[in-house]
């Protein structure tokens, strides 16, 4: 019986599907639309400018792949690096599998797909290969990776991107095995860097490294055929407690699609997904009771321990820090009645009334675990003590608006795309959106961005 690395390589080279069922296609297409929206909104962020300066003359007009929707061209490796980082720069991209799959897979596949002249249908199928690879690996460890210091987007995204690109390139099982082994040694990213420029870099590096691993394997670089499941391999290395399954075979891989179970959670707010349910709850209370900051004595937030650990910034002073702050999310909902791009600025975060509202927030952790997204508690809850002695209560909140179980409408997703495109002053955004909607029909994925060159 093959080990995990070879099984995943066989899946990447010969998955048991050659097209996406309609329900799966709709989810994957939304992932592409939402990622391009987040990329457009994030492409002027400081971290993106740092990468542009770093890449310098490697961004030209004659490269293989589009950079930042019309800002130049570069090799597929460099394009994936900068595009993946831009798509994650505002933390506005989708969430699933304890991380951000689309901000890794979409930039990797569009960059490499353009370089090799792949069709839209081929890119969409490769996305599913990457998603299912990620899902097969992350569920083998019972301990939350965020609590151990690992950013799942960075570590699992690298292997998922390698599997997806290997499928797109049509490599053999042997080459795919080496590519996954190489990717396993490239994977890395720490939650300690949440709330800094390095966090979005995790996504760009994962996308870029996934492509590079396949390129190296194609050129003959070898890796251990059991790099994932070896006792000193990838899964064991990222599981210090050793509670990881290295042996159970992947018998249903590609047959029972995890994407149908977990889907994609499309973000309504450009902050860490760990706070989305309580943001929904707080905004509901503010609207229903016409709450004003002066009325509030204490805001009690009940959420999971892993969520609380991710929300490391308790008194943020910048918009970047505020993305990972429970206190800010509640304060923004209370003072501005919104948690959006307009509130994620340094000036807004430092306002006296926002800083004062943050000091009223208290976090309380619960032990329950969501079976779909284990980094979340089963439910979250917000209670607000008012100065007049009353208490307001959201009750248990099971799903955030925009989650796969409480999805946004097609109109909501289009509005988010248009809002992000307007922020970026993107020319011909409607044309780009139409191309994304028809991605499965494009004969050459390079035509997706053709109107912006």
Image (cartoon, rainbow, N blue to C red):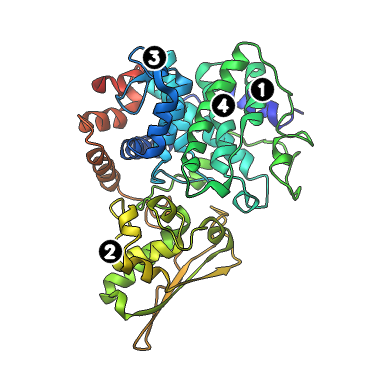
Q: CA distance from mark 4 to mark 3?
A: 21 Å
Q: Depth-wise, is mark 1 or mark 3 nearer the camera?
A: 3
Q: What's the mark number on residue 206?
A: none
Q: Which residue is mark 4?
A: 162
Q: Residue 316, image x and y in percent? A: 43, 59
Percent x, y of residue 273: 45, 53
Element class at badge 1: helix
Q: Toward the viewer: 37 or 25?
A: 37
Nearest to viewer (mark 4 / mark 3): 3
Residue at the (34%, 66%) spot, across then down? 354
Q: Residue 336 has which mark?
A: 2
Up the image or down, 429 lies above or below 259; here it is above
Furthest-right residue in this view: 231
Does 169 sit left or right of 289 as displayed?
right
* Spatial CA span between label 4 and label 2: 42 Å
Q: CA distance from mark 4 to mark 1?
A: 10 Å
Give the Cα distance between marks 2 and 1: 51 Å
Q: Local crowd at mark 1 within 10 Å, few (<14), some, or many (≥20)?
A: many
Mark 4 or mark 1: which comes first in sequence? 4
Is tag 1's residue or tag 3's residue first in the polypeptide sequence? 3
Provide the residue designation for mark 3: 63
Tell which of 214 and 59 is nearer to you. Answer: 59
Does dot 3 land on a helix, a strand or a loop? Answer: loop
Dot 4 or dot 2: first in sequence order is 4
Q: Determine the CA span between mark 2 and mark 3.
A: 44 Å
Q: For residue 226, what is the image quadrant? A: top right
Q: What residue is pinned by disc 1?
A: 177
Task: Tell me if 135 is positioned left or right of 357 in this view.
Answer: right
Tell which circle, 2 or 1, labels the residue nearer the N-terminal end: 1
Image x and y of residue 9, in percent: 64, 25
> Badge 4: how crowded within 10 Å, few (<14), some, or many (20+)?
many
């Amino acid at each position: 019986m093959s080990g995990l690395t070879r099984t995943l390589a066989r899946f990447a080279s010969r998955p048991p599907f050659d097209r996406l069922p309609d329900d799966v296609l709709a989810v994957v297409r939304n992932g592409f639309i939402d990622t391009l929206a987040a990329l457009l909104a994030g492409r002027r962020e400081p971290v993106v400018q740092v990468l542009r300066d770093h890449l310098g003359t490697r961004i030209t007009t004659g490269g293989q792949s589009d950079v930042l929707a019309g800002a130049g061209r570069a090799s597929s490796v460099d394009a994936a690096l900068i595009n993946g980082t831009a798509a994650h720069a505002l933390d506005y991209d989708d969430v699933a599998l304890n991380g951000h799959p689309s901000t890794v897979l979409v930039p990797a596949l569009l960059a490499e797909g353009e370089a090799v002249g792949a069709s839209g249908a081929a890119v969409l199928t490769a996305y599913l290969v990457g998603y299912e690879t990620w899902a097969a690996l992350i569920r083998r460890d019972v301990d939350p990776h965020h609590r151990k210091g690992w950013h799942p987007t960075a570590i699992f995204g690298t292997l998922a991107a390698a599997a997806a690109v290997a499928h797109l390139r049509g490599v053999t099982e042997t080459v795919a095995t080496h590519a996954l082994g190489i990717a396993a040694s490239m994977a890395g990213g720490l939650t300690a860097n949440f709330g800094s420029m390095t966090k979005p870099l995790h996504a760009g590096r994962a996308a870029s490294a996934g492509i590079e691993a396949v390129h190296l394997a194609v050129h003959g670089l070898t890796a251990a055929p059991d790099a994932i499941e070896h006792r000193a391999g990838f899964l064991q290395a990222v599981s210090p407690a050793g509670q990881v399954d290295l042996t159970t075979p992947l018998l249903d891989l590609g047959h029972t699609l995890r994407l149908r179970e977990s889907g994609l959670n499309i973000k309504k707010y450009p902050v860490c997904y760990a706070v989305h349910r309580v943001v929904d709850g707080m905004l509901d209370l503010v609207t229903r009771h016409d709450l004003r900051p002066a009325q509030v004595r204490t805001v009690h937030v009940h959420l999971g321990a892993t969520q609380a650990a991710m929300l490391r910034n308790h008194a943020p002073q910048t918009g970047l820090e505020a993305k990972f702050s429970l206190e800010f999310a509640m304060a923004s909902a209370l003072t501005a009645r919104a948690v959006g791009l307009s509130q994620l600025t340094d000036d807004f975060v430092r306002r006296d009334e926002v800083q004062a509202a943050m000091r009223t927030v208290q976090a309380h952790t619960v032990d329950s675990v969501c079976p779909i997204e284990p980094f979340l508690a089963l439910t979250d809850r917000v209670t607000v003590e008012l100065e007049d002695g009353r208490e307001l209560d959201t009750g248990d909140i099971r799903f955030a608006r925009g989650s796969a179980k409480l999805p946004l409408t097609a109109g909501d997703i289009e509005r988010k795309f248009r809002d992000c495109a307007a922020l970026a002053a993107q020319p011909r955004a409607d044309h780009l959106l139409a191309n994304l909607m028809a991605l499965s029909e494009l004969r050459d994925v390079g035509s997706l961005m053709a109107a912006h060159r």
